[in-house]
Amino acid sequence: MGGPRVRAAVKRALGRLRSRRIAPGMTILTYHRVGGNSPDERDLDPAAFAAQMDALAERDVVSLDQAVDRLEAGDRAPSVVLTFDDGFADVYEHAWPLLRKRQLPFTLFLATRYVGGEMRWEGSTAKADGAALTWSQVLEFVDSGLCTIGNHTHSHVPPDQLTVAELDACNAEIENRIGRRPHHFAYPWGIPVPKLEDELRRRFRTAATGLVGRNLPGQDPVRLRRVPVRRTDPLEFFEAKLTGRLIPERAYGALVTTAKKAGAHA
Ligand SMILES: [Zn+2]
């Protein structure tokens, strides 16, 4: 829908509608890339990412396990969980120094097949430059005590190709490299796969989707909801992700869907 300026202007207007009330429950933010030099909406400008981390200074940013502990205890206290999907090298270069300085816990969902190489699969954000993290960078994250490593399948397969073998290959590789088996999973493309939920429950404490929403006590742990962060999100739109009922986020999502449908018919 429109160019980046139009998107940012629409979001700025929607952001003004944000509630000031900090929302209860766990808000999981989804990041992919920071400063990767791609035009993709999921690749954030480093200065915008830094401003977002500053905006989180007043919030309770906790690890995924801590947030899930609270939900399981019936605690509705607001918490923010930072997640990074895929494993792009630009996260090490541009996000890691800020996370480390602020001692912010985060979860990295790794597609293990690409670690140490290029992040290339059908529909990947990697065009010209898509270097993946190396295992030594991943180990540096883990050794800091700030990072939880999660499973994002071995090959970043589409939902109809998600298999137990893909889950287990990723788990085995992570366990082999960092000595710890992952307890959390994120669906590639954010799309739930109901027929694999029993297998996911056997292997993981949680599975995170791309469905927009927050998580309150009673939320099904293999259908955690998240809130995406995008390049054209102005700071007030980012702040709206943490307050109220996500009305600006949902309104923007509906606008994009409508625009895409209109475009398809044009
Ligand atoms: Zn992904």
Image (cartoon, grey):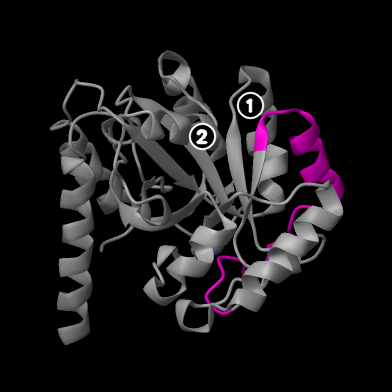
In this image, 183 relative to 251: left or right? right
User: Is 4 within the magenta?
Assistant: no
In this image, 99 relative to 133: left or right? left
In this image, 117 relative to 128: left or right? right
Asked whether residue 114 is in view, the answer is yes
Q: What is the residue that sits farthest to the top in this orientation? A: 58
The residue sitting at 15% across, 76% down in the picture is 262
Residue range (magenta): 122-147
Check whether the beta carbons of the residues at disc 2 and disc 1 lie within 8 A of each other: yes
Residue 98 is labelled as 1
Q: Position of residue 226 (x, y in %)?
A: 37, 47
Residue located beneath label 2 in the image: 49
* Amino acid beneath label 2: Phe
Q: Position of residue 233 (x, y in %)?
A: 35, 42
The residue sitting at 44% across, 67% down in the picture is 197
* Amino acid beneath label 1: Leu
User: Is 145 within the magenta?
Assistant: yes
Q: Is mark 1 within 8 Å of ligand 1?
A: no
Q: Secondary structure at mark 2?
A: helix
Quadrant housing the N terminus: bottom left
* Quadrant hosting ligand 1: bottom right
Q: Position of residue 65 (x, y in %)?
A: 54, 35
Q: CA distance from mark 2 to mark 1?
A: 9 Å
